[in-house]
Image (spheres, helix red, strand yellow):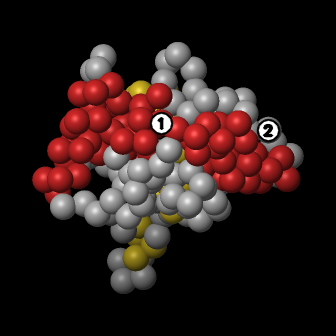
Amino acid sequence: MVMQSEIIHSIKSHIDQCGIDIPFPTTTVQKVASAEASIGMPLPLLLRELLIDVGNGGFGPGYGIIGVDVGYHSDLSDIAGTYQQVCEGWSECGDTWPTGVLPFCEFGSNIFACDTNDTSGDVLISTDSTIVPTTYDLERFFQTWIKGADILAVLPRPPRPDIINPFLNRPDN
């Protein structure tokens, strides 16, 4: 396991080397605590430190990590509002959002990276109706981003329909 300060240093170095713009300045411990109170659970320590020491969201994989208060908002809201809206959305569909699972990074099209908020620190990928486990913990999630690998490669690909080539009258390969 990489030490917290090492992964934050790696993220900062990656941001500097790639010239990534940090669109929202860092936030405060008090604003993070307010978001945690609204959500009803603590943010993962690494995410908390990134918001306080690097920037209030909008950087990282996909569209970026979701900030607190006036930081980066997903298509739904800040991190507290996103959590509440995802829970409500699943409830409206007759399902229950898993306890302790926090959407923290947005990829668009209602796809989020979520932290399990337990000691394992596992990251899940959620879509409209599915939660897919990954091989990442939060540190490995950011290390994968730094390496430039496709974080969403863990999602199952829909089967390709058999398309009949009209000229050959057989499926296209």
- The residue at 56%/51% (across/down) is 68
Question: 77 above or below 140?
Answer: below
Q: Position of residue 19 (x, y in %)?
A: 18, 61
- The residue at 42%/82% (across/down) is 166
Question: 82 above or below 96?
Answer: below
Residue linked to disc 2: 96
Q: Secondary structure at mark 1?
A: helix
Neighbour class for label 1 at 10 Å: few (<14), some, many (≥20)? many
Q: Position of residue 129 (x, y in %)?
A: 68, 49
Seen from this angle, which residue lies furthest bottom? 167
Q: Position of residue 155 (x, y in %)?
A: 47, 45
Residue 63 position by quadrant? bottom left
Residue linked to disc 1: 48
Question: 20 above or below 146?
Answer: below
Quick check: 93 left or right of 54?
A: right
Quick check: 1 left or right of 32?
A: left
In the image, 65 versus 114, the foreground residue is 65
Q: How many marks?
A: 2
In the image, 88 versus 37, the foreground residue is 37
Sequence-earlier tag: 1 or 2: 1
Image quadrant where one finds the C terminus? bottom left
